[in-house]
Amino acid sequence: MTEPFTLGVASGDPFHDSVVLWTRLAPDPLAEDGLGGMPDRTVEVEWQVAHDEHFSDVVASGTAETGPDDAHSVHVEPGGLRPSADYFYRFRWDGEISPVGRTRTAPEPGSRPDRFTFAIASCQSYTNGHYTAQAHLAEEDLDLVAFLGDYIYETEDQGEIGRGHFPEVEVRSLAEYRLRHAQYKTDTDLQAAHAAFPWAVVFDDHELENNWADDTSYEEDIPRERFLRRRARALKAYYEHMPLRRPQRPNGPDLHLYRTLSYGTLVDLHMLDTRQYRDPQVEDDERDDPERTLLGAEQRRWLSSRLSGSRAVWNVLAQQVFFSQRDFADGPPHEFSDDAWDNYRVERDAVRDELAGVGSPVVLTGDVHANYVVDVKADFDDPDSETVATELVGTSFTSGQDGSEQDPTDEVQLRGNPHIRFLNRRRGYVRNTLTPEQWTADFRVVDRVSEPGAPIRDRATFVIDAGEPGARPRD
């Protein structure tokens, strides 16, 4: 049998004493049945964790069973690790050894870390660009990557740069979703970024279907039961290809994705799910219904409890869609996105008011293929109202192709939304460095993804002082 570790390795969701390790056996990753060329039987995969990349000091090891029902994916959660420590890991099967990955555990609960560095990223259409930004990301020194959605795209798009989607259809079956994930995972730059440090992932819409909402298709008028079957297939394939823990293993069409990652008393990172529980999108004149929800009742209660009980310096919502008000119209009437928090205004404003009562709140967002820095206002319609939090929106890795500094509509958007402090449409990611006193956000961009090899640069840097909501450009 040929090399089985064609999709690389990954780690994720670090705790102070454990981390989840992932790989998938796929000697033929694009085999049409979606099973990666593996035999139709259960196999045992060995794994090791060591202090050094040569594995001369192995600290944990074992075996894990996997089979065709899981597309021969492997999820291992070694325990007993040291807090705030670097580890190396690898897998072995059928005499073959995987690439080596590096991971890092979180600090001990209650400890007072003096630094936490992580990146946010999202939206990596395979057909829209080369993974140049991912290659640069792999060279950073990070504690974590928070990936905020659109890991794959479900479309049949073939693009213009010779990186067409496989299979050449909009994916709907389990085999097709597995193939699409496998195609993305074959990219060596993406593999390098996964192998360099742990990731915390959440999905948005394109892992299933554009702009889906709970049990409702946005694109097609199909029965609920049929859509939920598609959702179950998509979420199963998603879990099979992500470094997620056992509590995130899907149950039919349901996958419990919202959770908190804590880094001592420095930061609580609340990973939200803005897809599975939301009400369907409505027209602007219906968006003020106080019963409308983006989070769902259970997640909303969970978030309130987490925020009220947090003792962290920084309280962070890591989520998918634009949180702050964003009016696209040049004067009245207003024009808002129906897929963002603006379509759920009452709940958004309630969450905003809760954020105003916690330590140093920051909202992290993906989805819109652009970099933004936004003052979250106590009243978005009053520019002079208090700033209660900061929203940092990260651009896409590739989606939207090369991008630009700004597009022709941005002047209208900036004029109509004075709480938007910065807007740029290049590709890349946001690197964040947190201390007990300050948050520094570097907007790292490349000028092109239509061909590989573009250098990366800091397009802008903004600073947030702890206890003082609102960001300012670094001098």
Image: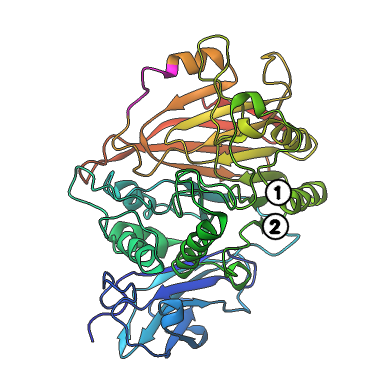
Labels 2 & 1 near each other (Cβ < 8 A): no
Q: Which quadrant would residue 315 be assigned to in this image?
A: top right
Vertical comparison of 335 with 137: above or below: above
Q: Is residue 435 visible?
A: no
Whether 159 is among the magenta residues is no
Query: Seen in the image, is 212 located left or right of residue 409?
Result: right
Magenta segment, which residues?
404-410
Instruction: Determine the main secondary structure of the stretch shown in magenta.
Output: loop
Residue at the image point whose x is 62% and y is 26% from the top: 375
Residue at the image point whose x is 45% and y is 66% from the top: 237
Residue 176 placement (x, y as % from top left):
35, 64
| Element marked by disc 2 | loop
Quote the CA–CA distance across marks 2 and 1: 28 Å
Residue sitting at the far left: 162
Instruction: Name the one closer to the observer, 62 or 3.
Output: 3
Q: Quadrant of the N terminus?
A: bottom left
Q: Which residue is mark 1?
A: 296
Q: Which residue is mark 2?
A: 264
Type of the residue with mark 1: Gly
Q: How many marks?
A: 2
Q: Which quadrant would residue 52 be assigned to in this image?
A: bottom left
Q: Which quadrant would residue 360 be assigned to in this image?
A: top right
Residue 2 placement (x, y as % from top left):
22, 82
